[in-house]
Structure formats: C-alpha cells, structure tokens
Image (tube, rainbow, N blue to C red):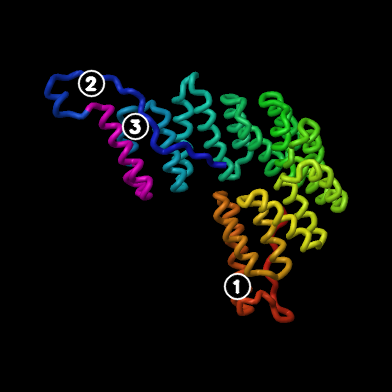
Amino acid sequence: MMKRMPWLLPLAVVAAVAGGVWWFVFRESMEEKGQKLLDAAAIAMKTQDFATAEKRLMEVLKLQPDNGLLHHNLGVLYFQQRRLPEARVQFQAAAKAHGPQASEVRAEEYFQLATLSYMERNWPQAARELNLAIESHPERAQLHTRLLDLQVGRMGDLAAADSTVVRYLRLCGRTAANLESVAYVYYQNKQYNRAEDVAREATAASDSAHAAYGLIARSMWRQGRLREGLKSLDAPLARYPSAATLWVARGLLLAEDSKHEEALAAADRALQLNPQDYEAHKLRQKVLGEMSRLPEALKEIEIAMQLTQDPAEQRLLAAQQQVIRGVLQQTGGTGVLPPGGAAPSPAPKP
C-alpha cells in the first residue's frame, strides 16, 4: 500500500536572519544551510546510509520544526528501516503540521499511517486512517479502493464495504472505470457474484470497458460456469478484436478448459497487440508450464519480472523461477520428469 513521495522536497522559505556584513559574507543563511543538509540526506539515502540521512534530516528539522514535509521524509526513512513506531510518530507529526490549504498532502500522511497499521495487522485502525485520508482528499480513488479491499478482504465486513462503494461512486463518479475498480476488488477477494454484477454495470456504462468484460468471464468461471464465461467473450471480441485484455481473459479460460494450444494462441494474439502486456506473459508462462515446455516457461518468467515492480509479484515469479530451474536441473534441461518424479508447483490462478 506504500506510495512514497519524492525524497528531496523543497524547503519552505526561511525568515531572513538579521546580522551585519560579517554574517552576510562569512556565514551561510539558514535556508542555504538547510538545503545543504537536505541535499546531504538525499545522497545518504541513495547509498542507504540511513544513519547519516537521519542525522542530516534531524538537523534540518531543528531549523524548521513545523515543516510537515521534513516529518514525512523522516517517516519514510524510518519505514525503510522497519522502525515502524518511529515512522508513525513522524507521519502523525506531518499530518498535524499540514494546514487547511494542504488537505491533499495531509491525506498522504493518513495513507502512510494506514499502511503502517495494515502491516501491524490492525485492520480497524487502518480503516479509520483511510477514512481520515478520504475526508482530506475525497476524490482520490485509490483511498476508496484500498478501504474497500480492507473491508472485503481482511475485515470481512461486506456491509461496510457496500457503504464504501456508495460513497466512492458518489464522490468520484459512477463511471465505467470506477465500477471496474470496484469489480476488481471484489474479484480479488473471491466475491465473484458481486464482481460479476458490478462488472456488468461497468459494461452497461461503457461498451469499451474491456477489463470489465474480462472480469465477467473470470467471475463466471470461478462460479463454476466456465463454458458460459468463454461464451460471454465472443461478442466483445467480435467488436474489439484489438483489445489485448479480452484475449488474455479468453486464453485463461481456455487453459482452464485444458485447451492449451488455443490458450497459447490467445496469449500470442494478446502479445502481438501489446508486447509489454504483463498478464499475457504470465498466461503464456502458465500454459507452457502445463504443456511441460519448461525452458520456454522460464523465459516468460524472466520477461514478466522485467515488466512488474510489484514486490509481491516479484516474489511469486522468483519462487516459480526457482521451482522450474530445479526441475530442469533434475531432468537435464528437458523438463520431462521420470515416472514418479515431482512436478513443479502450478502457478496460482489469476
């Protein structure tokens, strides 16, 4: 949930320091000194010299104790070191320091606090902090969807989730894109009937809501209606044959129907349309793995790892990579196990 703001942030203008010619010529102004210290902190952060970065930031904070951006940077510094209680103190100070004209920035501080609470598995507190963030920046869609994900997933509070959806769509608009976002959260948290219903509303709002058509098909599959889900993609694909998202959804369901060659062709079609499509490469990896074409599957993992910065996805891909490499080593590079040999762990279903 962490979204870090740029490390090097501008300093507020510091009041001029009274003094004579001696001070003007031979002494740094408070602003110059603060900027140099902040520059030094930024350099230290790049080399992960956290002790120096902290020391320099604390020195700047002595010059500007009510600077919310400095408190924020210290919070980020402590967060990166997993010093969570200290990070919380700094983000709280940052939220308090931001005035009424900085409501959007204050929302970021509450978002960081919610991130800490989530890491500490304190779901109610994370929900409270996300609500405070929404109060500060009501039109930031990410805050609504993170709260929805928390309520549907970790808290299992569907009634609260319904209220969050109503507020989200009221404040941010009942657009196809926002409805798609809601449907995706429901799908990711295995609320497939709700995901299907909201995705259908998204397609009613805009026929070009390609991701929503894919969510409808996937939700139907998850509810035991695989063939019906496949059929639901025919009409959208006829209207939008250049939508890579639809081909990925079709390929996934074909793979689940054990139609591997057709699934691979769908993945290839998606990659013709968008060579950088992360989901298409993951689909291709899945299908090639199920076809025991492990060297090719390994190549798809390597490509996918270059296309995502998501730490969770990176960990998943690295684990799959390790399994496949182990099988290839065991089989002398063929990927074909002897009778009774252990097969590689299947990839989780999208």
Q: Secondary structure at mark 1?
A: helix
Q: Amino acid at mark 3?
A: Leu
As helix, strand or loop, the secondary structure at mark 2 comes to loop
Q: Is residue 130 magenta?
A: no
Of the image marks 2 and 1, the number of the one nearer the N terminus: 2
Mark 2 or mark 1, which is nearer to you?
1
> Disc 3 marks which residue?
61
Asked if residue 43 shows in the view, the reply is yes
Give coordinates of residue 135: x percent, y percent.
Answer: 60, 24
Circle 1 residues within 10 Å: few <14, some 14–19, many ≥20: some
Name the one closer to the observer, 157 or 292.
Answer: 292
Frontmost of labels 1 and 3 is 1
Residue 38: which quarter of the image? top left
Instruction: Tell me where residue 290 appears, x and y as whole percent.
Output: 73, 66
Name above or below for residue 192 compared with residue 128: below
Compared to residue 75, the image places residue 20 above or below, namely above
Residue 189 visible in the snapshot: no
